[in-house]
Amino acid sequence: MMDIPIEIILLCIISFLTGFLNAIVGGGGLLQTPAGLILLPQYPMATVLGARLVILNGNSFIRIFFLFIVCATILRFAYDVVS
């Protein structure tokens, strides 16, 4: 079994939460950047900030998921109105 460092697990959780925050109101990077700098103090700042751009891929997934939920809710509401 692979040993995944706790820092990576925490960054994935934070990425998921900030992606959800970005999908709703924006501004998730305000949480993600300090979290990366706090959890990875042994790396240079440029490396952490560059890696943060890779983490933004999780945000794209959350945006698509949130869009799906909103569309499903609108369609359900429209169906109830028409029925």
Image (tube, grey):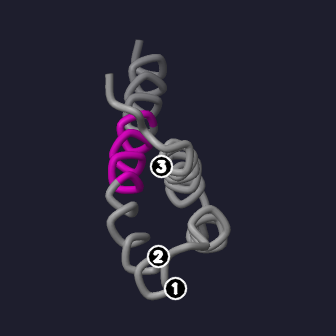
Question: What residue is drawn where x is 33% and y is 30%?
Answer: 2
Q: Amino acid at mark 3?
A: Ile
Quarter of the figure with the N terminus: top left
Say which of 13 and 18 sits in front. 13
- Please name the residue that numbered disc 3 is placed on: 8
Residue 48's disc is 2
Q: Is 63 in the magenta?
A: yes
Residue 45, label in figure: 1
Are the residues at dot 2 and dot 1 in contact (C-beta closer than 8 Å)? yes
Q: Is residue 45 above or below residue 3?
A: below
- Name which residue lies at 44% across and 88% down: 46
- The residue range painted magenta reads 58-69
Q: Quadrant of residue 33?
A: bottom right
Out of 15 and 59, give the one closest to the viewer: 15
Q: Residues within 10 Å of mark 3 (few under 14, many from 20)?
A: few
Q: Earlier in the sequence, mark 3 or mark 2?
A: 3
